[in-house]
Amino acid sequence: MSDEARDAVGEYRYGFHDPEVATIRFDKGLSEQVVRDISALKDEPEWMTDLRVKAYHHFVERPMPDWGNETLLNSIDFDAVTYFLRSSEGTERDWDDVPEDIKNTFDRLGIPDAEQKWLGGVTAQYESEAVYHSIREDLEEQGVLFLDMDSGLRTHPELVKRFFNTVVPYTDNKFSALNTAVWSGGSFIYVPKGVHVEMPVQAYFRINAKNMGQFERTLIIADEGSSIHYVEGCTAPTYSTDSLHSAVVELVALDGAKIRYSTIQNWSSNVYNLVTKRGVAHANATVEWIDGNIGSKLTMKYPAVLLKGEGAHAEILSVAYAGEGQHQDAGSKVHHLAPNTTSNILSKSISKNGGRSTYRGMLQVRPKAEGCRSKVVCDALMLDADSRSDTYPTMEVGNASADLEHEASVSKIAGDQLFYLMSRGHSEAEAMGLIVNGFFEPFTRELPMEYASELNKLLEIEMEGAIG
Amino acid sequence: MSAAMEDPSNAVHLWRSTPWSRMRPEEVEPTSIRMNLHSVDATGEASLDSCSPDLFPVVIDGPETSLPDVEDIARHTLANLDAAPMRLNLKGDHDAVVNVDLKAAGHVAVGRLHITCKGRAVVHLHLSGDTGWCGLHLTGHVANGCSLSVIVTDELPLESRVVRCDDWRVGRDATFETGTLSVGGLRRKSDLRHHLDATGAAVRIGLAVHGQGKRHDDHHVEIHHHKGHTTSELVANMACGGRSRSVGTGRLVIDVGADGTDAGQVFRNLLLSQGARADAIPELEVLADDVSAAHGAASASIDNDQLHYLMSRGLDLDEASAMIVEGFLADAFRILAAAEARRTLRDRLTVHLDCARIT
């Protein structure tokens, strides 16, 4: 590959920022009082305040993980983060009612346009809370709840109480504790029995302010025999100081239900993206994570599925791009807890310009999980000698009837592939672009058409811009 | 004698599956493992002598990188316990296998052996004795252009515990092969490290584990490619029956600039009973781009089609299963180029499986 091809990786096009709009902004730093103030501001029930306080103390006591990129993790200054910033007085149902600057931001991100064309509902979160929310009337009539999490807690407290903190308890890890203490925004979805939400619903998360922390909490419950596809996108401006994004996502797929959760994470390169995403699949249910990691400084994200009911299925498909100064520490975890459960994991990563990509996986079969099957494939492409690729898969098999496979490979783009394409008239850069597109194709074909083309544009900027 | 070290916590990757607290030797006077070199043929020279402890650093640093876990408790303990390290010098081309008997007696038996090879040789280290705890540290260097195969078998008591550490260095255009048949002892922890120091170096590792009863067998294999145009291959086949547990962790590191490296690792688990458990963690750390690095892991029970095929030819279920297990374990040694090494390991495996069936 020529130097030109290597060097020209495009600019982060979502790095613009608007003047800060704040109706309420907390001082930087975290304390029990901050946690209580967030809860009071939202007028939450007592059980939620208590849970937040417990989680806060757990966060303070729990040490930082001693694995992964410890240097970057230990450089996070939790006292320099703003934990709550309200930029709008309420959540609007009409884009015209959203404050002008914020609306302009989402216009530039193309959200209202996408909503009209192909989405069943949209939540747009700006800083700590949702500023816009809508759902198609026909879905509302079928009893589908699609709310921002704050509204979900306000209007359906019993349902939230039943599932909140059950899939990802605050004791799970330091960052799930932090999220539980200071969560704000996110999505709450309930799909009633037998209802199939045909069009995807989308949430878009945008950090605009400097040193901002965004801690959205998402809870999706698909009741028996229902299905939903949830799409999430994230961007932030490029600042010289760091921001922190620490989300928790809990999915509950009851018997026979199906949840597909698609994410394209494209945070700017000053954002720490430390999230916990986990789903529970009951009998014959399916949970699918379609996970793209393009941006951020450090991502640590391992979408997980607990296959709790017989016949449950998990599908995890992820791609990561690690460019200059980035460490994409991503992976997947599947726990086969029940008999005849199946899972499929495909992970693809590209490291370039000194970027580091890491796959960290866990595949576990518990002793009572008879007749399980799983396949894990990890492919990594290294585009230059300065980059790095690591693979840390763990396979724990406690039942003799399990049939598991794991395979991984690391390589550069093959010279003969380049030669083949160039001999047919493509420049080296075009040939590289075609090969990279093909490498990510198993991922992009699983996205809705419009989202896939959005991802292709992103990759065009990050990769193909460099190459053709 | 170096100062005492603190026990590693269970969070330390190397000791996560097999805590050191369960492997630590009893505090009794250790006995040195008696090493006996059988006579060798006239084609090569071999000598077994005592040597300086300096040949057994607690951890060997790579030429351009220092290993992350420099404070290794197992190597440290073996260095403290063993007062009589030995050295096996091999020169010339050995047409026949060089046999070294290692007799481990007493409650705690410890031995350290350094092997240097300036020629071509196959060395068979056979570990036996009635010890309750056996610690063995093997180090060695294969000189430029030379070839060394080391195979390790054992006949230790079923209730014994075994700690083994290896540190091997392989020179320019040199080849190092090692085959291990792990069938003895109750609890075993191996930490086997291999350094490809110069261009053209090659390492091939075959590991077969037969878990029975409550055996716990934990093998950690590290392969460091320090220079480019080096190759490595690891095949670890583990058959687990009874309530045994096997753990196979691999760490394959390809350093910056080690372009042209070709490395592969495969961990296969054959689960023979409901109570057995097998863990595989093959890790890759790649810091060079022009490489071919791959790993795979698989876990399954005996294929019913294979059983059916053999039983349709007159074998009963036990015979058919035993044949499949034998073939599966023997397959781990197929990557070894030295025919004598493959044959010796295969013979030992057959004897072991026959005995296991009878008992």
Image (tube, rainbow, N blue to C red):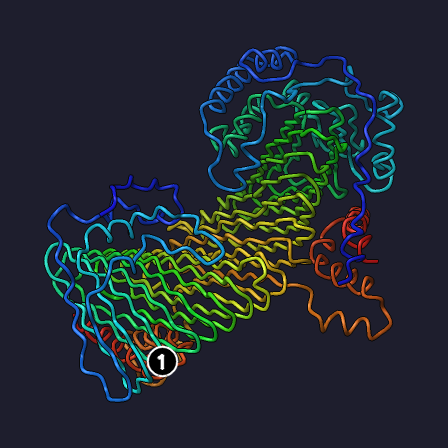
Percent x, y of residue A430: 83, 63
- In this rendering, does residue B243 appear at all? no
- Please give the name of the residue rendered at 22% of the width and 57% of the height, measured from the top-left corner: B135
Camera-nearest residue between B145 and A240: B145
**Above or below: residue A206 compared with residue B266:** above
Q: Quadrant of the C terminus of chain A?
A: bottom right
**Above or below: residue A454 compared with residue B166:** above
**Above or below: residue A335 compared with residue B215:** above
The quarter holding residue A71 reads top right
Percent x, y of residue A242: 67, 30
- Please give the name of the residue rendered at 24% of the width and 73% of the height, measured from the top-left corner: B353
Q: Quadrant of the N terminus of chain A?
A: bottom right
Q: Amino acid at mark 1?
A: Gly
User: In this image, A302 relative to B117: left or right?
Assistant: right
User: In this image, B19 relative to B160: left or right?
Assistant: right
Percent x, y of residue B10: 35, 42
The crowd level at tag 1 (other Cα within 10 Å; few <14, some 14-19, many 20+) is many
User: In this image, B22 relative to B298: left or right?
Assistant: left
Marker count (numbered): 1
Percent x, y of residue A305: 54, 44
Residue to which mark 1 is pinned: B119
- In this rendering, does residue A308 appear at all? yes
- Please give the name of the residue rendered at 23% of the width and 87% of the height, measured from the top-left corner: B41
Mark 1 belongs to which subunit? B
- Please give the name of the residue rendered at 62% of the width and 40% of the height, measured from the top-left corner: A299
The quarter holding residue A122 reads top right
Camera-nearest residue between B345 and A100: B345
SS of the residue at dot 1? strand
Camera-nearest residue between A170 and B106: B106
